[in-house]
Amino acid sequence: MTNLGTTSAELLIELDRSSRRPLHAQLEDGLREAVRSGRLPADGRLPASRALAADLGISRRLVVDAYAQLRAEGYLIARRGAGTYVAGAPAAPTAPAAEPPPTTPAFDFFPGYPDLASFPRRAWLRVLRETLREAPDRSFGYPDPRGAIELRVALAGHLARVRGVVADPESIVICAGAAQAFALLARTLAGAPMAVEDPGMPVHRAILTAHGAELVALPVDGEGARVEELTRGLAAGSALLTPAHQAPTGVVLSSERRAALLAWAGEGGRVVIEDDYDAEYRYDRAPLAAMQGLAPDRVIYTGTVSKTLAPALRLGWLVAPPRLLGTLVAQRLLADHGSPTIDQLALARLLESGAYDRHLRQARRRYRARRDALVAAVARHLPGARVTGLAAGLHALVRLPEPVDGRALARAAARDSVGVYPLGLSYLTPRPLDDGLVLGYANLAEPAIEEGIRRLARALRAPRPAPTNDGGAIAR
Amino acid sequence: MTNLGTTSAELLIELDRSSRRPLHAQLEDGLREAVRSGRLPADGRLPASRALAADLGISRRLVVDAYAQLRAEGYLIARRGAGTYVAGAPAAPTAPAAEPPPTTPAFDFFPGYPDLASFPRRAWLRVLRETLREAPDRSFGYPDPRGAIELRVALAGHLARVRGVVADPESIVICAGAAQAFALLARTLAGAPMAVEDPGMPVHRAILTAHGAELVALPVDGEGARVEELTRGLAAGSALLTPAHQAPTGVVLSSERRAALLAWAGEGGRVVIEDDYDAEYRYDRAPLAAMQGLAPDRVIYTGTVSKTLAPALRLGWLVAPPRLLGTLVAQRLLADHGSPTIDQLALARLLESGAYDRHLRQARRRYRARRDALVAAVARHLPGARVTGLAAGLHALVRLPEPVDGRALARAAARDSVGVYPLGLSYLTPRPLDDGLVLGYANLAEPAIEEGIRRLARALRAPRPAPTNDGGAIAR
C-alpha cells in the first residue's frame, strides 16, 4: 500500500463559497475527481480529516462525512486505525470526443424528406399548448401501448376519409414511425418468409432482418411489384409493398396486380403489408384509395407523419386485422412501452382541428411546383434523361441516357455539395452500374433544384474510371 | 355473375352540395361504402353511368371518373361491353369496439409513478416554445439515433454533477425510457447469460427475454443483490442491478458488494448494468454517487425521466463504454431510428435552465412528506408491520406481521379502490404467499395515503381462504 503522504494542498480541492452548490457536495466532487484523474493514486492515503478540514477552512464534520460518502460509493476504503485510502485502481477518464460536423450537402435530393422548413411550428405549438392545458393528469403516466385513444379516434376518421382505409380505433397501433411498425411486424409475422420489393428500401430491409424476418425478393417493373411471382409460387407468408408510389421507383401498382395480390393473400391466411408512406401526395388526380379498404382482413396498413409533418416527430401507425393485434401490441409494449403521450394528443388535435389537412393542401401545391422545377431542370441540364414516378409522392426517378457507376457519381456530386441517391444501391444485390437516380425534390426550393441538377450534370460530365456490375456492399 | 339490376336509388348515395368535400369525392365515398357494406353485393352490376348521373343530378363525367377511380382501386371491374361490376367478395366491415374504461383504482400505490399532478406543465410548454422558435430546420429531419447532441451535452453535465457519472456526450445514447435501454442491451449483450435481481421487475425481465437475453437469478437480501453468487461462479456475462434503491425491496447495495461487483466485472470483460431509476430521491442524506463513476469501462448506466418528470415522455438514457456504443446505436437505429427530436431539445433546455433541478427539489420535499405519511399510516392502521426501503426512491416495502396470499389481498383491496403490489409476484418464481407489499407513495396526497392504508387494513382483516406457496403465473 502506497503512502504518498498526501497533504491537503496537493488535493487542490477548490471550494467556492459563492456557489449555490453546497460545500459538502463541492468537497465530494473534488475528492471524486482527484481519484478519477489519478491525482490521488490507487492505494494512496488521504490526509487526516482534521488536517484537510483545517487546510480548507471547513468543519471537520464535513470532511468526515465526505470520506464516509466516498467510502460508501467505493472510491475510498478505511483501514482500521490506519486512515483512509483510495480504493483499487481508478478508472481512466473517458476522453471527450468531438461531435462530427453535420455533413448534409447543400443541394440534397434525399428522397425521404418533406420540406423541413415548412414544418408548421406555430400550429404544432398551439396543439401542444392546448394539450398541456387540458390533458388530465393520468396522461402523464405510462402510455397506452396501442397509442392514445384520442389519436386513434382521430386517425380512424382521417384515414377513412383521405385514404379509404377501414379502421376503427381498436384496429390501430401507434408506432414510432413506420420504421418501428416494420420491426413489430417482423417480430409478429416471423415464421414464414416475407416478400419485399426489389428494388426497395435498404434501411427497411435491415430493420426487418434485424427483427427476425426472412426476406425474399419481389422484382419491380413498370406496373409495380411483379405480383405474379407470388401467385406462381414464390414462398412467402406475407408481402410488403408500396402500392401508391413504389419506393424507390415511383411506379403505381396496377389494378390487375392489386386484385391478384389480394387474391393471393386470401389463400392460406397470408397478409399484405401496404406501406402507404407518401400517398397523401398525388398531383394530377385524386389519390387511389388504399388497398386496405378492400380487404381489411388481410391487409396491414402502415402510415407515418414523416412525409407530411416531420420525421423528427417519430409518429406512425399501423392498422391490422384483429387476429394480429394482440401480438403487435405486446411487441410494442416489449419494445418501449409506447409512444410519448403529449405528442400523440397534440397530433390528434392537429387532425381534429383541420390544421393537418390545411398543411397538406399547402404542401401539395408546394411540392407540385418543385416537381415541375425538377422536370424542367432535368430537361435543361440532362438531355436524354427521362423522369418517371412523377404522379405522386416526394421523389422521382431520373433515368440517365446510359448506365453510370452510381457510387462514383454520388461521390463526385457530393464533392460539389449535391446529394444524389443511385437506384442501383436499392437492390437486394446492389448494382453499381445502373441508369437510375432517386431524387427527392420536396426539401429543396426551386432555385436549389435548378442549381443542384446543374451541378449533377457537371459531375456526370467529369471523367471517371469505367465501372463494372460485379456486386458490392449495400449503401444507405 | 349476379345481375341485381341495381338502380341508382338503391345505391342511396347521398351528395351534400353544401359540404366542403367535393362531389366526386362524396360519390367515390358512397360507392366504396356501398361495396363494403354489401349493399352492392359481390359481382353485382352497377347502374350505367348515364342513369346514375341523371338520378343524382350530376354530370356523367363525374360518374365515369368515379367508376374509373374505384376500378383502379380494385373495388369495381369493367367487363368489355357489359358494364361495371363489383369485384370479388367485399370485405366485412370491422365492427368498432368500445374503449374499456380506465381501471386505475382511486388509491393506487403503483410503485412506478412520480406525482403525475405536479408535472411541470408550464415549464415544459416554455421549453417547447423556445425549441420550436429556435431549432434549425434540420432538427425536423430524421433524429440522430444516439440522441440530439444538445441533450447529450446537457445530460453529461447533469449526470456528472448530480450522480457522479463519468459521461461525455459521445458515451450517451438517448432511449425511449429505460425500457428501451434494456431491449437494446439485451440485443447487444446476447451471447452470455445476464444476472438479474430476484425479486426484480417482471416487466423488465419480459423485455430482456423478448430481446434475446438469457436470465439467471441473483438473490437479494438486506444488503442488496448477493454479489457473492456471481463471484462464486454463477455463470453470467453481465449483471443488471439497482444499487441505489433495489427494485422492488428498496435496499441499498452495500459498499463491500459494490467493490466485489466491480472486481467481478473487471475479470473477463464483463459488464454491470446500473439501473439508476429513482436515485434522484434520497431523503435522509445526500445520495450515493453512481457506481459507474468508479468504473466507466465496465459499468453501463441507465436512467430515465419517468421518475422525475413523467413516464409519458418516454425519455431515458444509457451511458456505455466505447466498445459497446457502436452496437447499441445500430440497435437503436434498427428499433425506431431514434427519439423524437423536439422533446429531446426541450429536455435539454429544461436541464440547462435549472428548471429540472428546481422541479426535483420541490419533488423531493413533496415525496419526503408523503413517505412520512405512509410510515405514520402504517403505524396507525397496520400494527406489527414494518416499513423498509425508506431512505430513497418513490416506494417502500411494507412487511406485514405474517405472510398473506398476495393475489387475494390485491383483489380484495382493488374492490375497495386500493391498488397494492405484492412483493411475492416480483420473484422469478412467484411466491403467492409472502409478507411483502411494494407501495409507491409519490402519486398520492397525504390524505389519500392515510385512507388507502386504512382500507388496506380493512382488506387484510377480511377472511380469506388459506393460501399456499405452490407457484403460479407472473403478474404485471
Image (tube, coloured by chain):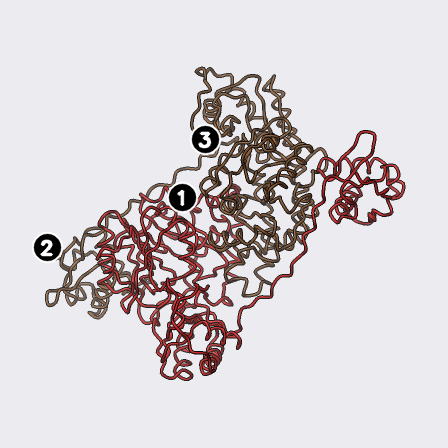
Chain colours: A brown, B red
Q: How crowded is mark 2: few (under 14 residues within 10 Å), some or many (20 or more)?
A: few
Name which residue lies at 17% across and 64% down. Answer: A52
- Mark 2 vs mark 1: in front: 1
Disc 3 designates what residue? A475
C-alpha separation, residue under disc 1 versus residue under disc 3: 18 Å
C-alpha separation, residue under disc 2 versus residue under disc 3: 55 Å
- Residue B449 coordinates in the image, percent (x, y): 46, 77
Q: Nearer the viewer, residue A84 or B351?
A: A84
Disc 2 designates what residue? A2
Q: Using residue A263 as the reference point, say whether residue A237 is left or right of it.
A: left
| Residue type at tag 3 | Ala
Q: Residues within 10 Å of mark 1 (few under 14, many from 20)?
A: many
C-alpha separation, residue under disc 2 versus residue under disc 1: 41 Å
Disc 1 designates what residue? B329
Q: Nearer the viewer, residue A437 or A41?
A: A437
First-in-chain label (2 vs 3): 2
* Residue B228 disc label: none
Which type of secondary structure does the marked residue at label 2 adopt? loop
Q: Are marks 2 and 3 in contact (CB under 8 Å)?
A: no
Name which residue lies at 19% across and 66% down. Answer: A53
Residue A145 is at least partly visible in this image: yes
| Residue type at tag 2 | Thr
> In which chain is the residue bearing label 3?
A
